[in-house]
Amino acid sequence: MISDKKCQWCGKQASSYNSIFIPAEDKNLCVCLHCYNQEISKAAGIDFDQVQLHPVVLTDKDGKDHEFHFSLRLMGDKQVLSAFEVAGDALSGYEFSCIGNTADGIFSVFSQLYGRMLSALNQKHICKNTETGTWQITREDIVRGRISCDDASGEYPRIPKLLIDGKAVSWDEFGRMLMPYQGFRFILQIADPADDTQG
Ligand SMILES: [Zn+2]
C-alpha cells in the first residue's frame, strides 16, 4: 500500500513516495513533502513555488503502459524530482530521480527527468526466450537496472532484488541469465540513482 500514511503536520493522507520521516523528540514524524518543502523554504529563506505535477502514462518499447507519479523534495539550493511507477495502490518497477538547482525552477529538472524516463522505457535489456520461457540478456550484452532488497526471500544476510526494464528479477534468476556467458568476463559498475547512466 502506498497511501497508508498520514502527514503529522497537516493531517492529510500522504503516499510513501510523497512523505518523509523526520526525527522529532522521541520518535520519527511522518511528514508530507508539501509541508516539508514549505518548512525548508522558510528556513532557507527561499521563495519556493510548490508545483503539483500530475501523473503521466508512458508506453514502453513493447507497447506496455506505465503510470508514473512525481515527488519533489527541496534541499535548499538543490531540489530532487523523482518519478515512481505506480500500479494500482503499489509501487511498481521503474523509479527515476534527478537533481537540479532550485533557482532554475522545476521545469528544467522535469525535462531532464522526463528525457531519462523516455530513454529508459525505450530500451530493453532482458527478453523472454520463447522456446524455454526463461528470461535472457538481449544481444547488446549490457544490463542496466536498480538494486533493491529481496525482503520476501526471508534470507539473512539480505540478498538483492534487481529491477530491470521495470521488472523485478531475483538474484537467482539473474544468475541464470548469466550462464550462457560462462567463461566471459564482465564489468559491474555501480552508479548514483541521480546520475544519468542510460548512455
Ligand atoms: Zn503535510
Image (tube, rainbow, N blue to C red):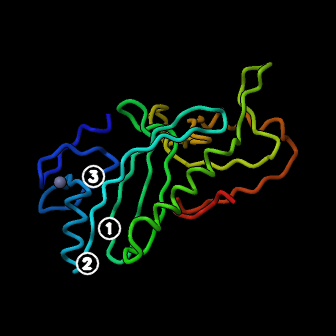
Per the model, the C-alpha gap separating discs 1 and 2 is 10 Å
Q: Secondary structure at mark 2?
A: loop
Per the model, the C-alpha gap separating discs 3 and 1 is 12 Å
Q: Secondary structure at mark 3?
A: strand
Give the residue number, with chain letter if any, for mark 3. 19
If the picture is divided into quarters, which one holds ligand 1?
A: bottom left
Q: Earlier in the sequence, mark 2 or mark 3?
A: 3
- Nearer to us of marks 3 and 1 is 1
Task: Tell me: 22 left or right of 73.
Answer: left
Q: x, y (%) of residue 199?
A: 69, 60
Task: Tell me: 187 left or right of 173.
Answer: right
Q: Mark 1 belongs to which amino acid?
A: Leu
Q: Which mark is residue 74?
A: 1
- Nearer to us of marks 1 and 2 is 2
1 and 2 marks in contact (CB < 8 Å) = yes
Q: Earlier in the sequence, mark 3 or mark 1?
A: 3
